[in-house]
Image (cartoon, rainbow, N blue to C red):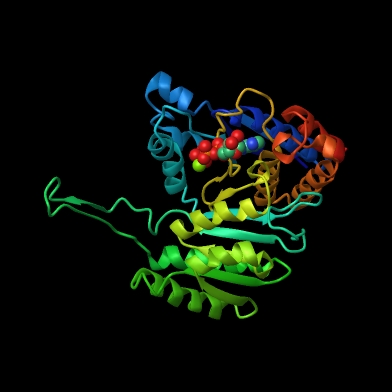
Amino acid sequence: MSERKYRIAVIPGDGIGGEVIPVGQRTAEAVAAKHGFAIEWQDFDWSCRRYAETGRMMPEDGIAQVKGFDAIYLGAVGWPGVPDHVSLWGLLIPLRRELDLYANVRPVRLLRGMTSPLAGRGPEDIDFIVVRENVEGEYSEVGGRLYDGTDHEMVSQLSIFTRRGTDRILDYAFELAAKRKRKHVTSATKSNGIVHTMPYWDERFAAASARHPDIATAQYHIDILTAHFVQHPDWFDVVVASNLFGDILSDLGPAVAGSIGIAPAANLNPTREFPSLFEPVHGSAPDIAGQDVANPIAAVWTAAMMLDHLGEATAAAELEAAIETALEDPATRTRDLGGTADTVACGEAVLKALA
Ligand code: ATP
Ligand code: MG
């Protein structure tokens, strides 16, 4: 029997991306060796650095180059001096759209030994997943300006919710909840103020709920929902939201679980027609880049999500457990968690916990 082998495209990107991704790779390889599978990495230098040299974040046929891989593992892209829309529209958004990475998934869990900024909250209170619709909704290019420079100047931007796009993200959320202990889905909405798209989302949510009768549900308007994230994080299991609302919730979620240096994320193509993309929540962190102080845990946890998606659930769970074991020892925490360990030492602690 031949050994299971996964081919992963690696895009370390900018800043601390190049520091934390190698740690994620080493820990993934270590757990792979224990579980009898192999990982073959191929590096891509797509980044703002590349943009400065060539005028492009990635080559013209970039998408075609990565389409055949089993997954994409990305550090962070963005650098001062390069406008955000260049790194977004020159790389991340084309990848999301052309690989149909329609589910953006961010688990939020307070790890053992970590303190939440929410006073009195422990690991039993904070354990939920934010599922964001990643390719349509409010982030459309449809719209524009009229009567520029006159008193009648006006601007509009269309939100687009298709039945297919809405149903598939809602179904993804329900199916995810079915695999979890609490079996509960919360929908973020705003159907009192946004009178066409949000009532439509609610209607499709009711239909999805009917397809999944074993899953309990709740619905909140986005404004009060953000308050509940802070005051009642224990109410949530799977939270599903449109592109814009999900964007907001998926930054707020990791914030209630502590440092952005531990928060993982996945951009998934759940049908597996194309490779999914795995990328920590944090950015390139220019303020600490090159100092070897970046927390590599977000990248390691993101690698665990990647292994899980590839079908290596046991290995993924073991890597996650190793993260928790490593972090329990204050000596292995990086500066953002109040410790003094450097990036490499923190990674070594995870490797030791695995061994
Ligand atoms: P982006 O626009 O790409 O999201 P950003 O500038 O908004 O980037 P980050 O690059 O994530 O945000 O940085 C936000 C803050 O968090 C910075 O002070 C940074 O140093 C800190 N930070 C981010 N990631 C880490 C990490 N892995 N370890 C320690 N600190 C981090
Ligand atoms: Mg940012």
* Total residue callouts: 0
Nearest the eye: 68 or 49? 49
Where in the figure is residue 282, as x and y percent of width and height? 58, 41
Nearest the eye: 179 or 6? 179
Decide if residue 172 is in sight here. Answer: no
In the image as oriented, which residue stretches furthest toward the top?
53
Q: Quadrant of residue 234?
A: bottom right
Left or right: 194 as drawn, with respect to 335: left
Where in the figure is residue 120, as x and y percent of width and height? 75, 60
Left or right: 123 as drawn, with respect to 303: right
Q: In percent of the image, x 59 and y 69: which residue is there?
A: 174
Q: Quadrant of the C terminus?
A: top right
Q: Quadrant of residue 198?
A: bottom left
In the image as oriented, which residue stretches furthest toward the front?
119
Where in the figure is residue 143, as x and y percent of width and height? 25, 53
Decide if residue 104 is in sight here. Answer: yes
Q: In percent of the image, x 54 and y 81: which residue is there?
A: 210
Q: Quadrant of residue 19?
A: top right
In the image, residue 187 above or below residue 27: below
In the image, residue 219 above or below residue 55: below
Q: In percent of the image, x 63 and y 44: which residue is there?
A: 260
In the image, residue 180 above or below residue 252: below
Q: Quadrant of the N terminus?
A: top right
Where in the figure is residue 274, as x and y percent of width and height? 52, 47
